[in-house]
Structures are given as structure tokens and as C-alpha cells.
Amino acid sequence: MFLALIRKQLKVLWRHPQELVILLLMPIGLISIISFALGSLMEGDSNPIDVKLAIVQHEDEQQELAAFLQESQGEMWADVHSRESLKQMLPISMLLQLLEQEDMQQFITVSQITSSDLNALKKEGKYDVILEIPAGFTKQFYTSLFVKGEIPALHVYINEQKEIASTIVQNILESFQYQYTLMAELSSKGLLTQDVKLPTADTSSTVQTVNQQEPVSTSVYYTFSMTVMFILYIAGTIASQAFLEKHMHIFDRILLANIQPMIYLLSIIVSTVILSFIQVSIVFVVVYLMLDISFVQLPLHLLVTLLLAIVVGSIAALLSAANYRFNSAEFSNVFGSVIVSILALFGGSFFNLSTFAPTLAKIGSWTPNGAALQSYLTIQQGGGLGQISSYLWILTAVAVICTAIAFLLFPRRGGIA
């Protein structure tokens, strides 16, 4: 008789193909759409950074240095050695040398343009950053350094639509300014000579990876996140159908057949577990064939799936018991329309909370779907039974608590209140 009740539950759902399509095909469709839509964005497959920098010089730097040295004849510091040092420390030339290094050329392209093209380039937005070196910059810089006076400034024009590129150039310029100012100040004080070397730290280091686990792709993440969310809808669906049986006096006839109410409730749990396990299995097989997702350590995946299915069965029993006790289908309806969405949000089905809200992610791991999701991801990253044991205990506790409450709430007699 118990097996007959299970078959009855499955046949009732089979006679509602629309609900079957939603429960079985909807997660597959969402997984496919999200994987193709967000895959390149979340996995970092976007185009590499290519910063386009334009440099505009209004005057020749060598001529400006010559003019400064000409005006500085007779000064005590303007000896032959100092003159040669200044030629080696031309600020713009050193900046260009820095930008033309091989490491820099991997992500930044420098173009030198004429001053006549400056206004047109500002409007076109062809370059991410335009660096304008005003006339007399080098001469004014050396004057402020040795004779004192106003410090000159470079003009930097940033394309507001290219925030990353502009930030990179800004950081490079700030770092260069600090290093060059330090060297120039030491040179102006006579502390930087051929016989003086700046101290260097004799250090050694090793690089260790903190997280040894493999990263999870977008397809893998949303395969599991959508699976643990849609499996919860089965609980609400089964509970609604069970209440319909009470309304149609089918439950009364079951009692007249001398079948214990607890046997009927247990049949709801078992049939829900079977349906949930089938749903997850179909999803996994389809994404394996369609998205080429491999399931490492398959026995652990099956263990988590079985525990999650048992949890869903216990939730279905709890909702059915509440519906029967209070003679209303509101409990299963609210669960399917509101509670599942809340659990999905905190459990990480919509997006990975750990990236920006670690506290909420920690709370979400205590939900059944969140614990199952973390278990799947940990297994996929190479984790073993020991790494997911805490999540398995959460699933077990939820199943036991919901089942116990369901058996306490479920009425022993039929009829409609």
C-alpha cells in the first residue's frame, strides 16, 4: 500500500505537464542563458587592457635645457659635472623611457602628436589619456629646482569613459613624479654623485598561493545555483497537490481504507525525494552534454543531491502538514512565491554574495540551498568529504527538524474544517 501511495503521488504530478515543464526545463533554460550571457564577463574573457596615451610637446626639451644652462652661467652649482647630470635627468625623456619599456608596452601604447592636433584629438576621443607638456616646462622645472620659483605642471586630459585606462596612467605618473623628485632633490643638494649609490634592500621572497582550489566557471556556478533553487519549488508543488487531495476528500478515502495518516505523509516525503533526485539528475546530464561540464568526484555529488532531495521531501511534508492543519494552501503558495526567492537570494543562487557581502554569504550557507550550493562548489574545486561535512550536517539537521514538525502538525483525521 505504501508503494501504491508513492505511485499515486507521481502519477498526479505526471498529469500536470505544465508544472513538470517548469520544474524540469526552466532550470536548464536559465543555466544556458546565464552561462552564455555572463560567461565572458565573469570569467575575465574580455579584451586585454590596451591604454592609448598621446603625448604633446610644445617645445623641444633639449633646447629648453640649453636655454636654462645659458642663463645659469656663472652659478656655483653650474659646473661641468652638474651640466652633464642635468642632461641625463631630462624629465620628459626619462618619462618616455619608462613608458617605452617592454613591460609597459604590453598594455600601453604611446603616441607623440603635434600641438596643432591637440584640440581635434580632445573632441574625437581617440586616446584614453592625453598628456600635454606646456611650453617652457623643462626650463621652468629646473628653475624651480635650483633658483626657486613656481613649479610647473603637466596637463592631463582623461577620457571619462575609460576609467581603468585613466587610472593606470594616473598611477604611473604619480609614481614617476615621486621617484624623479627624490632623485632631483638629491642631485640639487649635491648628494647624488658618481661615487654615491642609493642603498638597495637585499631581500628574498617566495610566492605562495593562499587558495589552492581551482576557480569555478560561470557555467558551473549557475548550474549548481539554479539547481538548488528550482529543487525547492518541488516542495511547494507537492504540498499544493496534497492539499487538493484533502479538498477532494481523497485523504478521507485513504483513511477509510485503514491507512495510517503518517504513512500518507511518509509517502509524500518519499515521492518528493524521488522527483527531486530525478530533476537534479536530468539537469546534470543535460548540462554535461550541452555545456561540457564535468562532475568530478561523482559519488560526492550524488551524496549531496540525495541529502538535498531528502530536505526538499521534509519541507514538502511540513508544508502539507501546515496546509492540512489550518485547512489552507497559503503555506505552500507563500513558500513557492516568496520564501524560495528569499532562500535563493541568501543562498547565492542569483549572484555570489561572498565577493561583496561575506557576512550575508556566511548566513546563506546555513540555508539548505546555500549549504548544498557550497557543497557542490567545494567538490567541484577538488574538496573532499571532510571539507563539505559541515554543510552535510546542516542539510541533515534541516531534514530532521522539518520532518519532526511535520509529523507533529499533521492531523490524524480527515474532513474539511
Image (cartoon, rainbow, N blue to C red):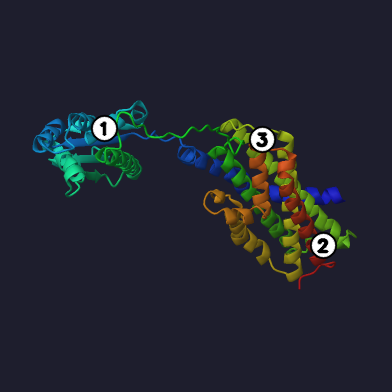
Query: Closer to the observer: label 3 or label 1?
Result: 1
Q: Which residue is mark 3?
A: 382
Q: Earlier in the sequence, mark 3 or mark 2?
A: 3
| Residue type highlighted by circle 3 | Gly
Q: Secondary structure at mark 3?
A: loop
| Residue type highlighted by circle 1 | Met
* Residue 287, quarter of the rendered image: top right
For residue 407, the mark is 2
Find out whether the residues at labels 1 and 2 contact each other: C-beta distance under 8 Å. Answer: no
Residue in the picture at 23% in, 45% down = 157
CA neighbours of label 2 inside 10 A, class few (<14), some (14 to 19), many (20+): some
Q: Which residue is mark 1?
A: 94
* Residue 290, quarter of the rendered image: top right
Task: Please state the horizontal and vertical placement of residue 246, each as a whole percent of the image.
Answer: 76, 63
Q: Is residue 319 above or below residue 202?
A: below
Q: Is residue 30 above or below residue 343?
A: above
**Could you give the CA–CA distance between mark 3 and mark 1, rounded to whole angstroms?**
49 Å
CA neighbours of label 3 inside 10 A, class few (<14), some (14 to 19), many (20+): few
Q: Earlier in the sequence, mark 1 or mark 2?
A: 1
* Residue 305, quarter of the rendered image: top right
Left or right: residue 306 compared with residue 69: right
Which residue is most to the bottom?
Answer: 417
Is residue 69 in view?
A: yes
